[in-house]
Image (spheres, grey):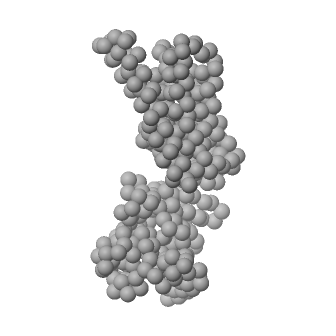
Amino acid sequence: MRVLQRALLTGWMGWLMLLSGAAHAHLMVAQRGTLNFVDGGAFMVLSLPISAFQGIDDDGDGRLSMAEGHAHWRDIETQVRAGVHLVSEQGAAPLEGVMFNLSPPDNAPTAPASQLVVMGRFAWPSGLQGGLFGVRLFGTQADEQTLHVTVTRGGDTQLLTLSPERAEMAVFPSFWAVISDQLWIGAHHVLAGADHLLFLWVVLAAGTGLRHLVWTLTCFTLGHALTLLACVLGGWKVSPALVEPAIAITIVGMAGFDRWSQNNGRTVPFAWRMGLVFFCALIHGLGMAEALADLGLQGARKFWSLLGFNLGIELGQLAAAGVAVGVFWALRRWAGERAVAKALRLASWGAMGLGTFWFVQRIAMAA
């Protein structure tokens, strides 16, 4: 039986190598991978950056030639075995038949490659359910810090997004694990997303009192929740090249609108302002949906993934609102209303300047 398994594995690897050679070695898109569970095993294909490996790039050009690959194949195998793992409740699954292939540019199939396609098979008994899959081989460039792995088992599919900060994720977890996991991701997305955070502070800084706080958070929540639902459950998709500059425009527009209203002594009806917050939140929801699309689960877990992500966003918003309320309360108490008004003016101008910078930067990146 072991001889038969090894023969099947060798045949599978050989077929992959032939396929990759026929397509100029592009067996897998850079920073992508697959993990396919079938009877008795989990077959893995990963496209990893050369800079993730130590001591294999002899000439230091950031690429791997065929000669360097042949000279260091044992080093590559050792680092793959140490840096890639699949763990079940019974312990770490053995990784068998590690092979690799260079992934050079399409227009130069014999040139040194910046990506290495790694293949292997984990021994995984058919009765086992979920587990943990982890990769600790990330490159030095910004676009080499994320690895997207599509996991399949029968008709079930899951997308794992791994990074140095999140190098291990559960494979086909329970719905409670999905909710808790996505809750953390949603909160982190808000608190680490400077544009969403800045917009929220801009709209909160324009008024005081519990009524303003509650209605602002409610309108922002409803707006981005609607577009999240439309994108995740309805399949609606808008290009990030349009969404990201539009998010920057919402910051400039909201801060500029507040400055214009105050400078001209205009009192804007409360309902109009809340409608403007709701409209801008629709645009921010598109950006959040893009993040969830990269991190979320498919199939039956999609609803729980969306629920946890949304709850995390709300917790992040509440934390940001608490910080804003605390800062203005302290400023009002210790420096008075004039200091608060001055701080709000400076904050508005600063938000417009930063939003404009982001808009120009994102337009240039999309061009």
Q: Residue at point 42% right, 41% down?
A: 192
Residue at 50% of width from left, 88% of height from top?
3
User: Can residue 1 be seen by looking at this rendering?
Assistant: no
Q: Estimate the x, y position of residue 341 in percent, counting from the top left.
A: 41, 16
Name the one closer to the observer, 215 or 204.
204
Residue 174: x and y, percent? 53, 50
Among the 4 quarters of the image, the one containing residue 51:
bottom left
Hey, which residue is sitting farthest right in the picture? 234
Report the residue that reaches farthest toward the front.
Answer: 264
The answer to whether residue 219 is above or below residue 61 is above
Please state if 298 lies on the left or on the right of 13 as rendered.
right
Q: Is residue 200 above or below residue 291?
A: above
Report x, y in % for residue 323: 39, 26
Please tell me which residue lies in front, 334 or 323.
334
Q: Quadrant of residue 250?
A: top right
Quarter of the image with the C terminus is: bottom right
Count of labels in the image: 0
- Residue depicted at 41% across the width and 58% down the height: 142
Which of 35 and 283 lies nearest the eye of the viewer?
A: 283
Where residue 204 appears, as percent x and y from the top left, is 48, 23
User: Quarter of the image holding residue 89?
Assistant: bottom left
Q: Residue at x 47, y 61 (%)?
A: 147
In this image, 276 relative to 77: left or right? right
